């Protein structure tokens, strides 16, 4: 199935909060009025409540309790609030039926935080890395909502031992990265985000490599390794060298940031609404 054919059969795209779409369209715009941003967030009660909930998790807050959306925007700053809006908005977009919300949310959070951690070992902006990581698998949402029968076949393939990407390609002729990248393009996301989502599975195959895509690849590697009970030290030492060179990641600095990401991930998952 070609991308165009896939999207032609999509009856209804997932509903994205307007403020989330605005922030992802203008990710490089640093002139956003934080007071106005706070007011906009306050008009979306569900999104605003979840942003505030996450802002008060120990992973973001620090010491003082944040009592309002405006205070969160001012105290945390634009880049961090953008990250929280993306996380909270994605949380609210998940299908309620025939979908493992906890697994999806947990992977998105952990990959986002690991991408952010590895960005701190390079010159890539950490909160941009977090945002790209948070959205890395949101093509999965469209597969489940737009093609539920095919999504069921994919799950059957997984039970028989296929990888998710292989199962998606066999069933749809497409994978979640291609679908997510095209959805991001249709929603007019920043090219930084679109390229990161699209290239994440094979970034070295592209002439113009997206370095955030490389970070996502590294973060997914780290996530799987940690799930296999490898220590943060082992994960840091065994990060694929060619990918580290492409992203400019200094592996000698990675262990402490990975440990921090593990702790933050546990806190954010426990503060989520899933």
Image: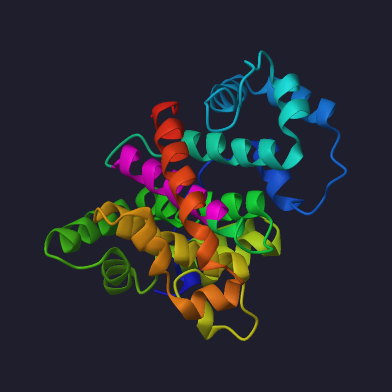
- Check the picture and name the quadrant holding the C terminus: top left
**Image position, residue 269 (x, y; %):** 41, 33
Horizontal and vertical percent for residue 249? 57, 68
Does the rendering let one see residue 183?
yes
**Quick check: can you spot residue 185?**
no
Q: How many marks?
A: 0
Above or below for 184 versus 23? below
Q: Which residue is at a point 64% across and 23% down the rendered structure image?
A: 44
Span shown in magenta: 99-117
Q: Residue at x 53, y 33 (%)?
A: 59
Q: Quadrant of residue 78?
A: top right
Residue at 32% across, 54% down:
231
Whether residue 46 is situated above or below residue 23 in the rendered picture: above
The verdict on residue 101 being magenta is: yes
Residue 152 place in picture, x, y as percent: 23, 54
Q: Position of residue 105 (x, y in %)?
A: 40, 41
């Amino acid at each position: 199935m070609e991308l165009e054919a896939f999207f032609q059969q999509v009856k209804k795209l997932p509903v994205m909060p307007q403020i989330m779409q605005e922030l992802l369209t203008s990710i490089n715009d640093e002139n956003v009025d934080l007071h106005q941003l706070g007011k906009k967030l306050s008009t979306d009660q569900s999104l605003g409540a979840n942003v505030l909930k996450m802002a008060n998790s120990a992973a973001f807050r620090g010491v003082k309790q944040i009592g309002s959306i405006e205070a969160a925007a001012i105290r945390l700053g634009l880049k961090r609030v953008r990250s929280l809006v993306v996380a909270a908005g994605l949380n609210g977009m998940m299908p309620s039926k025939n979908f493992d919300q906890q697994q999806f949310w947990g992977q998105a959070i952990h990959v986002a935080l690991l991408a952010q951690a590895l960005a701190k070992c390079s010159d890539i902006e950490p909160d941009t890395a977090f945002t790209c990581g948070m959205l890395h698998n949101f093509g999965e949402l469209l597969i489940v909502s737009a093609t539920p029968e095919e999504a069921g076949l994919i799950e059957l393939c997984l039970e028989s031992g296929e990888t998710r990407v292989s199962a998606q390609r066999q069933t749809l002729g497409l994978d979640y990265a291609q679908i997510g990248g095209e959805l991001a393009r249709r929603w007019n996301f920043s090219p930084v985000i679109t390229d990161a989502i699209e290239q994440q599975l094979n970034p070295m195959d592209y002439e113009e490599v997206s370095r955030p895509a490389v970070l996502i690849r590294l973060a997914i590697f780290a996530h799987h390794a940690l799930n296999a009970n490898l220590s943060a030290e082992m994960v840091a030492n065994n990060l694929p060298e060619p990918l580290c060179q492409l992203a400019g990641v200094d592996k000698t600095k990675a262990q402490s940031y990975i440990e921090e990401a593990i702790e933050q991930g546990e806190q954010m998952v426990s503060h989520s609404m899933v």
